[in-house]
Image (cartoon, helix red, strand yellow):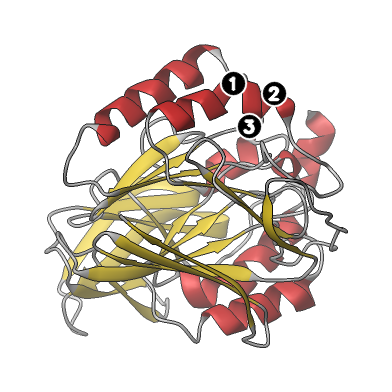
């Protein structure tokens, strides 16, 4: 462990937003500083930034929760004393329609990662889900610095929902960098008529996490105002790529996804794109083309579409209708899916 710790040292980063368990009225602003400093943020509905929050304890890893915000409203913020001004919008309580982004495996090739992020920034969306392997080495400061420099264009203004991948090892750095709801290493967020459950394939799949998953899905599946349930995890239970299907994940969790009506399970790990047909009512999408070296991907009897390409997914929700588009860095839509309930 000591070797890992020597390689990871605090660094300056732009701010980035993560969700609380109440995305319409609160937000977490995160940032990092090389020197230990107080956490000090100014914010407000206009550029006068009349409100401030200060945490009087010096740290390198800053996480400030802002509460009591108005749903569906724009706010500006800046890290004091001399940060730039950014803006974000709280999630509306009952939006008629909204979009979100799926990206995964952004590690290794910064040029490809940048190209994907540049294309994402052409679209309008409320939040971004990451399927894991944000960086190549979880203990390497330079990898994290590169990640935040590329992503900050987006995640300084939009909610970022990450999940742990195997490359985030030894994980304490990820835990230091991100403040997330619930247990942090696995958590769920409700956004309008959508529930997103982010799971951790890098720890015990049974035991406590499985029990928690069943409870969350039981709760969401009986709520009639939730029309869509998505799971997000790193290792895919169904994949025709070079890693292949993770049978442990399939055995531990897929029966639960099926039982509680999960609509789509997003995963990463195999650096390609694959969408399955419905498998016992559930669609599985591998979206791991965010910048990692691409892997070949085949086809299995369950494959609806598979392709070796850098990409992200744009999902549009309009009440009980979903449209998903898989998009390359040049803007080409190479796969799409529509579900009406």
Q: Residue furthest front?
A: 301
| Position in image of residue 37 (x %, y %) | 46, 55
Cα separation, mark 1 vs mark 3, equals 10 Å
- Residues at circles 1 and 2 in contact by the CB criterion of under 8 Å: yes
Label number found at residue 248: 2
Residue 286 seen by the camera: no
| Position in image of residue 118 (x %, y %) | 60, 83
Tell me: residue 172, above or below residue 283: above
Label 1 crowd bin: few (<14), some (14–19), many (20+), radius 10 Å: some
Q: Which quadrant holds the C terminus?
A: bottom left
- Could you tell me which residue is drawn at 81 percent across and 69 percent down? 109
According to the picture, the residue beneath numbered tag 1 turns out to be 252
Nearer the camera: disc 1 or disc 3: 1
According to the picture, the residue beneath numbered tag 3 turns out to be 201
- Could you tell me which residue is drawn at 54 percent across and 78 percent down? 120
Query: Nearer the N terminus, badge 2 or badge 3?
Result: 3
Q: Is residue 87 left or right of residue 306?
A: left
């Amino acid at each position: 462990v000591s070797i890992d710790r020597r390689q990871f040292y605090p660094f300056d980063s732009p701010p980035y937003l993560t969700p609380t368990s109440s995305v319409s009225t609160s937000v977490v602003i995160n940032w990092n500083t090389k020197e230990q400093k107080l956490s000090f943020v100014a914010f407000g509905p206009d550029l006068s930034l009349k409100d401030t929050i200060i945490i009087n304890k010096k740290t390198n890893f800053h996480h400030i929760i802002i509460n009591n915000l108005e749903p569906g409203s724009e706010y500006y913020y800046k890290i004091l004393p001399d940060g730039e001004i950014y803006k974000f919008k709280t999630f509306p309580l009952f939006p008629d329609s909204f979009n979100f982004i799926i990206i995964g495996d952004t590690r290794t090739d910064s040029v490809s990662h940048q190209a994907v992020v540049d294309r994402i920034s052409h679209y309008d969306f409320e939040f971004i889900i990451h399927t894991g392997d944000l960086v190549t080495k979880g203990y390497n400061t330079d990898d994290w610095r590169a990640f935040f420099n590329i992503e900050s264009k987006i995640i300084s203004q939009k909610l970022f929902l990450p999940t742990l991948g195997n490359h985030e090892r030894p994980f304490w750095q990820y835990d230091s960098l991100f403040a997330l709801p619930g247990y942090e290493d696995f958590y769920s967020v409700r956004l309008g008529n959508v529930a997103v459950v982010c799971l951790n394939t890098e720890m015990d799949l049974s035991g406590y996490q499985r029990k928690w998953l069943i409870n969350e899905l039981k709760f969401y599946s009986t709520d009639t105002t939730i029309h869509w349930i998505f799971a997000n995890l790193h290792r895919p239970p169904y994949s025709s790529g070079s890693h292949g299907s993770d049978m442990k994940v399939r055995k531990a969790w897929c029966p639960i996804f099926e039982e509680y009506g999960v609509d789509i399970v997003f995963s990463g790990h195999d650096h390609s794109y694959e969408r399955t047909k419905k498998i016992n009512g559930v669609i599985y999408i591998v979206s791991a083309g965010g910048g990692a070296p691409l892997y070949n991907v085949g086809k299995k009897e369950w494959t609806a579409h598979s392709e070796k390409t850098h990409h992200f997914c744009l999902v549009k929700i309009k009440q009980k209708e979903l449209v998903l588009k898989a998009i390359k860095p040049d803007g080409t839509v190479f796969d799409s899916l529509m579900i009406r309930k």
